[in-house]
Image (cartoon, helix red, strand yellow):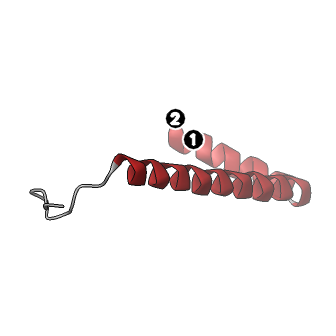
Amino acid sequence: MAANRGGVAPVSADVQNDVTLALDGIEGRIAQNLVHRASALVDTEPDRAVAVLRRWLHETS
């Protein structure tokens, strides 16, 4: 394959689809891990969980 202006060879649609599916899988595992860790934090340290959520809400508003 010929290189494009960026010096990177073009990628086929099949490869792009495979990469997209892999990233979706990684995002899913990250989300599951975050939910698991958040649940554990709420169970073990509910006051800290509330403080973290309040700080996040303050930063995003």
Horizontal arrangement in the rendering, residue 9 relative to residue 35 (left or right): left
Residue at disc 1, secondary structure: helix
Displayed quadrant of residue 9: bottom left
In the depicted structure, whether residue 23 falls above or below residue 7: above
Q: Within 10 angstroms of label 1, few (less than 14), some, or many (20 or more) residues?
A: few
The residue at 9%/57% (across/down) is 5
- List x then y, in percent, for residue 53: 69, 46
Name the residue located 13 percent from the left edge and 61 percent from the top edge. 2
Q: Amino acid at mark 1?
A: His
Residue receiving disc 2: 61
Q: Nearer the viewer, residue 55 or 36?
A: 36
Residue reaching furthest to the top: 61
What's under tag 2, amino acid-wise? Ser
In the picture, measured across the screen, residue 16 lies left or right of residue 27, that is left
Q: Nearer the viewer, residue 40 or 61?
A: 40
Q: Which mark is residue 43?
A: none
Q: Which residue is label 1 attached to?
A: 58
Alpha carbon distance from label 2 to label 1:
5 Å
Q: Position of residue 12 (x, y in %)?
A: 32, 51
Q: Residue at x 53, y 50 (%)?
A: 21
Q: How many marks?
A: 2
On the picture, is 4 further left or further right than 21? left
Name the side, left or right, on which 20 lies relative to 12.
right
User: Is disc 2 surrounded by few (<14), some (14 to 19) or many (20+) residues within 10 Å?
Assistant: few
Give the vertical position of 11 relative to 56 (above or below): below
Q: Position of residue 26 (x, y in %)?
A: 59, 57
**Tag 2 near tag 1, CB within 8 Å:** yes
Residue 27: x %, y % from top left: 59, 52
